[in-house]
Amino acid sequence: MKILHQILPMMELSFNSIDVERRGYGRRYSCLPVDAIDHKGFMIDCSQSYMRPEMFDLQPGDTVRWAVKGQRLQGHIERIERNGVILRAVLRDVDLLPPDFFAP
């Protein structure tokens, strides 16, 4: 029982993630972890990872979806900045998705 109490708090941890789709291609990423996201953009810090900013296939025009407090949002990548171990994406046209929105 003691081990179960140690595991449960780890399972309840949440992390920010995004889904990325590209017109004419389809889904690029599902549940891609990001370090920060808001209506202006998102950031991925690669300093503690084998991944590097140039390894992510993200382009202007890609559609980004994510959830905040039970609400789903969608925006489009306007610009990607890769500086050292940090990837930053600037978003545009961010809107709430309807509650019945479905993306397989």
Image: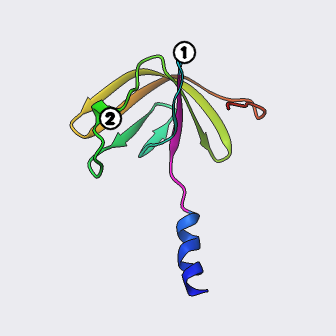
* Image quarter hosting the C terminus: top right
Residue at image coords 65%, 36%: 72
Tell me residue 18's x, y (percent). Answer: 52, 38
Residue with the mark numbered 1: 23
* Residue 43 location, quadrant: top left
Q: Is residue 47 magenta?
A: no
**In the depicted structure, whether residue 25 falls above or below residue 101:** above
Quadrant in the rendering for residue 23: top right
19 drawn magenta: yes
Q: How crowded is mark 1: few (under 14 residues within 10 Å), some or many (20 or more)?
A: few
Of tags 2 and 1, the one toward the viewer is 1
Which region is colored magenta? 13-21
Residue under label 2, please give it.
87
Element type at mark 1? loop
Which amino acid type is marked by label 2? Leu
- What's under tag 1, amino acid-wise? Arg
Q: Is residue 15 above or below residue 27?
A: below
Q: Quadrant of residue 103?
A: top right
Outermost residue, right side: 100
Q: How crowded is mark 2: few (under 14 residues within 10 Å), some or many (20 or more)?
A: many
